[in-house]
Amino acid sequence: MPQDLTTPPTPPRRRKHKNRRGLLLPVCCAALLFLIVIFQPWNWGRSDNGESEPDPDGVTEEPEPQVTPEIPDWVTVNLLPVNEYSRPGLPLERVNGVVVHYVGNPNTTAEQNRSYFESLAETGETSASSNFIIGMDGEIIMCVPIDEVAYCSGERNFDTISIECCHPDDTGEFTDETMDSLTRLLKWLIDSYGLQEQDIIRHYDVSGKECPRYFVQHPEEWEEFRHSLFE
Ligand SMILES: [Zn+2]
């Protein structure tokens, strides 16, 4: 007896149904993949600003909370009025570093540079300021509070404290008195905010600007100075 007659052929309708079921798995996989890509579960627990939300299990490592330190008595506090050109009054929510600058205007005093920042409130000539200015005699003026944003370091304005240093001439080299005060101020900030060596940077490291000029032209001296802060 021919085989054909004992085994009836599968009805075409049933074959069609079987084929449809065979498609189900790849379609489901594709849909699942699509959902995973859309919802990105690996980003759950992260907010839009890129900061991690507190993890209920405490598994995610949270940065240490920062407390704004009290200003030492060797710093003269002479704040700028809040204004859009030099003291926007925006909170500096986290300090991740300190940026060192030179004023670029030889033989001017800390007070003169502070007055210039204050004058911008009236002239609106440009946006500029700094949290601290160190003079050639080593005087330190704080003109923007350390928990507020100053307009000094471009894209790092929002997570760093800025220090402008005065200098006698075009070389941009700081006096010994300025260097001593810069050292003292940086050590205090390093200690207060738990900063590391790589957190102490030049304006040059942010934007490529030749600032502070002397330490851009003498990078080995900059590295040596920065290293000395942690010895
Ligand atoms: Zn600068």
Image: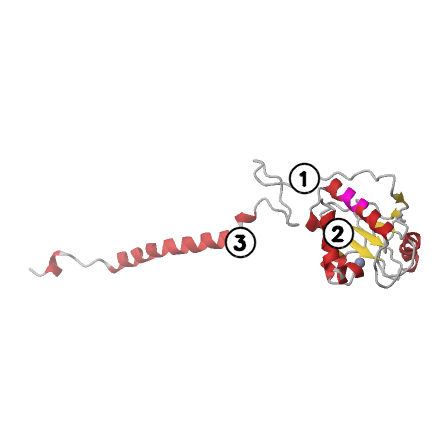
Tell me if 70 is positioned left or right of 37 in this view: right
Check residue 64 in the rendering and tell me which mark sits there, or answer none: 1
**Magenta span:** 184-189
Q: How many marks?
A: 3
Question: Mark 2 = which residue?
Answer: 225
Q: Residue furthest left?
A: 1
Camera-side mark, 1 or 2 = 2
Mark 3 Cα-neighbour bin, 10 Å: few <14, some 14–19, many ≥20: few
Is 69 magenta? The answer is no
Q: Which residue is drawn at 58% across and 41% down?
A: 60
Whether residue 106 is situated above or below residue 36 in the rendered picture: below
Question: Mark 3 = which residue?
Answer: 38
Mark 2 Cα-neighbour bin, 10 Å: few <14, some 14–19, many ≥20: some
The reply to whether callout 1 and callout 2 are in contact (CB within 8 Å) is no
Task: Identify residue type, mark 1.
Answer: Glu
- Horizontal and vertical percent position of residue 194: 71, 42
In what element is the residue under mark 2? helix
Whether residue 14 is visible here, answered yes or no, is yes
Task: Identify residue type, mark 2.
Answer: Phe
Q: Which of 121 and 65 is in front in this view?
A: 65
Q: Which residue is drawn at 21% across and 57% down?
A: 10
Dominant secondary-structure state across the stretch colored magenta: helix
Q: In which quarter of the image is ligand 1?
A: bottom right
In what element is the residue under mark 3? helix
Of labels 1 and 2, earlier in sequence is 1
Tell me if 122 is positioned left or right of 199 in this view: right
Q: Quadrant of residue 22?
A: bottom left
Q: Nearer the viewer, residue 65 or 110?
A: 110
- Horizontal and vertical percent position of residue 117: 89, 55
Q: How far apart are marks 1 and 3 (CA)?
A: 32 Å
Q: How far apart are marks 1 and 2 (CA)?
A: 27 Å
Q: Which residue is drawn at 89% across and 44% down?
A: 77
